[in-house]
Structures are given as structure tokens and as C-alpha cells.
Amino acid sequence: MKELNITEEESKNIPGSKTSDEKIIIQFTCKVCDVTSLKKFSKNSYEHGVVLVRCPSCQNLHVIADRLGYFGEKDWDIETYIQEQQRKDDVEISETITQDKNNQ
């Protein structure tokens, strides 16, 4: 995975989770409309729950993580899928987890 170089200040303007816990930021390209966007979501949801992100252009939902098996295989995530598919440049996930101090 490529590391995104996003400051904590810049991360405040990325759409997504508004909770006060740790966040993960993902840059992805929608395979429906080919629009690239950034989304922010909870690290806890990514590691223990379900994460869906909506494309801002076509409104398509993309599964990023499914630890509960709601959409198929239990304990599935996009990072593992990309590694298995050898498509490492399709998605960029931040290695640095940011915390939104405004929502604490």
C-alpha cells in the first residue's frame, strides 16, 4: 500500500466518520464511474465491524471491510483483497491514524 501524506489539519476536511476515536483515511477510485476520492472512517470499525464508503459522484457503495460477514466472507478487508489480486496501486490507505480533536 502507498502511504498518503495527509496532515491532521487536512484530514479534518475529508468526509467520513465524525467520532472522536482513531481514524483511517483511504483514497480509492470508484470502478463504476472512475472518480478518485478520499474518505475517513473509524479504525475500530475497520478492525472489528463493517465499513462502507459511498462514491461522491455516482453514489455507489463500496465495501472496505466486513469483519462480521454481512457481505460474504467473514473477516474480509480491502487490503487483503488487493494483496491477493496484486492490485496494490488501486487503493491507498493511510498508515498514520489521525484523531479529530474537534469531536472529543
Image (cartoon, rainbow, N blue to C red):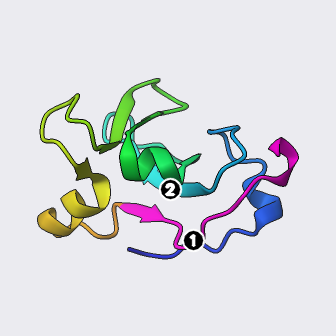
Q: Callout 2 environment at 10 Å: few (<14), some (14 to 19), or many (20+)?
A: some
Rendered-image quadrant of the N terminus: bottom left
Quadrant of res 56? top right
Image point (60%, 66%), residue name: 97
Are the residues tagged 1 and 2 within 8 Å (C-beta)?
yes
Furthest toward the top, the residue is: 59
Residue 87 at x, y percent in the picture: 23, 66
The kind of residue tagged 2 is: Gln
- Residue 70 got which mark? none
Furthest toward the right, the residue is: 102
Which residue is identified by label 1?
4
Image point (39%, 26%), residue name: 60
Residue range corresponding to the magenta coloring: 91-104
Q: Is residue 65 left or right of residue 13?
A: left
Secondary structure at badge 2 equals strand
| Number of numbered discs overlaid on the protein picture | 2
Secondary structure at badge 1 equals loop
